[in-house]
Amino acid sequence: MARTTDSDLAPHELRVLVAVTDAGGFSAAAGILGLTQSAVSHSVRGSERKIGALLFERGRSGARPTPAGERAVAHARRVLRLLDVLGAEARAAARSDAGAEAGPLRIAAFRSAALHLLPPVLRRLRARHPGIDPRVRIVREVGRGTAGEVADGKADLAIATLGGTEPLPPGLVANALFDEPYALVHAAGHTAPGTLPLVDWAENCGSYTRAWWAAQDWIPKATVEAEDDGAVLSLVGAGHGMAIMPALALTGAPDSVEITDLGPRRPTRRVGYVTAAELAGSAVVRALVRELRATLPAGCLRSR
């Protein structure tokens, strides 16, 4: 049997690192963990000594993780989550109940996926696996986006747009679910939508649409920037402009807007899921993936 060494961090040390990061300081972390401030400080110093790097910048306003600390805390979250999964699945196996998936399932999703893709998926998941407790966080799909939540150990699975310019963080696996087409949206009854200003938002155009966008000389430069796709639809419906939007964002669009197909050369974006390699085989993640694959949103094409 392998033995721990003096350089190994114990689970309680990992929990201290996560608590200090989340609380923003040693004293606040101590209150969360039920420890003294000196015990938290001692634990952090011990972890820094074992790792051989400064993990937190200390100051009057609290403690902030250094770049080394951010990496260490991300791994700490993922290790602690894997320990939770280990216990849950081992207990199920001991009861000869390996199919009874149970426990929390942390999901990160961009807004339109959380609003229009996940509800039927989670209904099916809860009906088949009542022991699973899904917890959804909406994350803007810019920069590291939803995949970054998985890399940082804050989510078990992310609904993400794939094929963008941001590389997948190391240690993660991604699989496509469907291709989501874009369409032209404008106020209902408007006879010349191309004359309207363009309404856009930061999450809308990634590398999967940029080349198509640049080739369309009829699309004006965006003059109205909205916070999210819901605001875009409100502005478009009120006649303040037109927009080019993906199918999920147009699910349940109000009668005040009209949706026009952009033809066979229309742009698409690929939607899929991202999870950590060590969690890909876990029972709760596999259960969610099964339901995701069984649910195809209207207007989307199954990815091959």
Image (cartoon, rainbow, N blue to C red):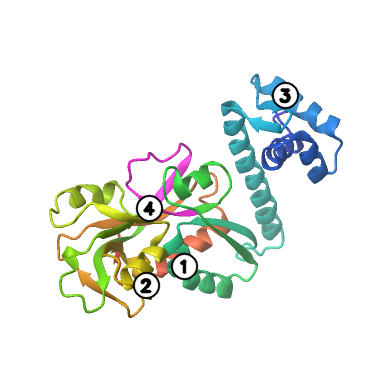
| Element carrying mark 1 | helix
Sequence-wise first label, 3 or 4: 3
User: Which disc, if any, is residue 251?
Assistant: 2
Q: Which residues are magenta?
A: 158-176
Q: Who comes first in sequence, dot 3 or dot 2?
A: 3
Residue type, mark 4 in image: Glu
Q: Nearer the viewer, residue 249 or 104?
A: 249
Specify few, some or many for label 4: CA neighbours under 10 Å numbering under 14, 14-19, or 20 or more. Answer: some
- The quarter in which the N terminus is drawn is top right
| Mark 1 or mark 4: whose residue is earlier in sequence | 1
Q: Position of residue 130 (x, y in %)?
A: 63, 71
Mark 3, residue position: 5
Q: Quick one: label 2 or label 1, which is nearer the N terminus?
A: 1
Does 129 sit left or right of 292 as displayed? right
Marks 1 and 4 sit apart, C-alpha to C-alpha, by 15 Å
Instruction: Give the image location of residue 56, x and y in percent.
Output: 67, 27
Does 163 appear in magenta? yes
Q: Earlier in the sequence, mark 3 or mark 1?
A: 3
Mark 3: give few (<14), some (14-19) or many (20+) Cα within 10 Å: few
Q: Which amino acid type corresponds to the residue marked 2 in the rendered image?
A: Thr
Provide the residue designation for mark 1: 115
**Quadrant in which the C terminus is drawn:** bottom left
Q: Amino acid at mark 1?
A: Leu
Q: Position of residue 276 (x, y in %)?
A: 51, 45
Badge 3 marks a residue whose secondary structure is: loop
Q: How much space separates mark 3 and mark 2, taking CA atoms?
A: 55 Å
Write down the quadrant of residue 278 in the picture: top right
Q: Is residue 134 left or right of residue 171?
A: right
Alpha carbon separation for disc pair 2 and 1: 9 Å
Contact, mark 3 vs mark 2 (Cβ under 8 Å): no
Helix, strand or loop status at disc 4: loop
Q: Amino acid at mark 3?
A: Thr
